[in-house]
Image (cartoon, helix red, strand yellow):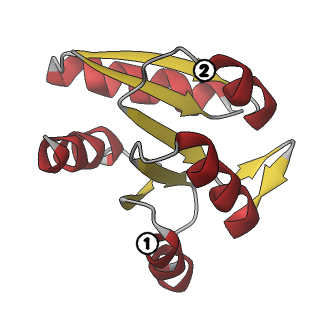
Amino acid sequence: MTRVLLVEDHMTDVLLLRELLSLMAVAWTLEDVPTFAEAVGRWPGGAFDLLVVDLNLPDGQGLELLARALELASGVPVVVLSGHQHPGLAAQAVQLGARGYVIKDLEAAEQLHDIVAQLT
């Protein structure tokens, strides 16, 4: 079973992603937190297989937040989940070490599923 920590401060996006993953019947455990500080508190001992992080949080933004997420994950794959389609930012995120840049839309769950499938 894949354990995913989602760092997302908009509950609507969390609920939509949960619903889409449920419809796909993925064998994941998805835990969510609204801030990066809470992700830091949850990460140790969490045995997560994937960290999914929004780049616009109350306590961090952009590539600086991604750098912090990559440091926290320490080798565990990190995927950016964003509400903005920005090819330049997506390319920079991948160059920094993100495994993917997923847009918050109805295809987000499928894209995350495909990224996880490539990791296993």
Residue at x 45%, y 81% (from the top left corner): 91
Q: In terms of image quadrants, where is residue 16?
A: top left
Pick the front one: 52 or 74: 74
Q: Position of residue 32 (x, y in %)?
A: 57, 21
Q: Secondary structure at mark 2?
A: loop
Image coordinates of residue 67 in percent, x first then y, are 66, 61
* Depth order, front residue of 44/37: 44
Using the image, tell me which numbered label, if any, was put on residue 63: none
- Quadrant showing the C terminus: top left
Residue 75 is left or right of residue 58, and the answer is left
**Along the viewing direction, whichever of 78 and 10 lies nearer the viewer:** 78
Q: Are the residues tagged 1 and 2 within 8 Å (C-beta)?
A: no
The quarter holding residue 28 reads: top left
**Type of amino acid under label 1:** Val
The correct choice, above or below, for 88 with respect to 64 in the image is below
Which residue has dot 1 on it? 94
Task: Give the image quarter of residue 7.
Answer: top right
The residue carrying mark 2 is 44
- Please state if 62 lies on the left or on the right of 49 as rendered: right
Circle 2 residues within 10 Å: few <14, some 14–19, many ≥20: few
- Relative to residue 120, is residue 56 depicted above or below? below
**Residue 105 spot, x, y in % from top left:** 41, 48
Q: Is residue 97 above or below residue 54?
A: below
Residue at 73% of width from left, 20% of height from top?
A: 41
Q: Position of residue 115 (x, y in %)?
A: 23, 49
Q: Secondary structure under badge 1?
A: helix
Which residue does the image show at 52% across and 72% down from the upper left? Answer: 96
- Dot 1 or dot 2: first in sequence order is 2
Instruction: Give the spatial CA distance, label 1 vs label 2.
Output: 24 Å
Q: Residues within 10 Å of mark 1 (few under 14, many from 20)?
A: some
On-image quarter of the N terminus: top left
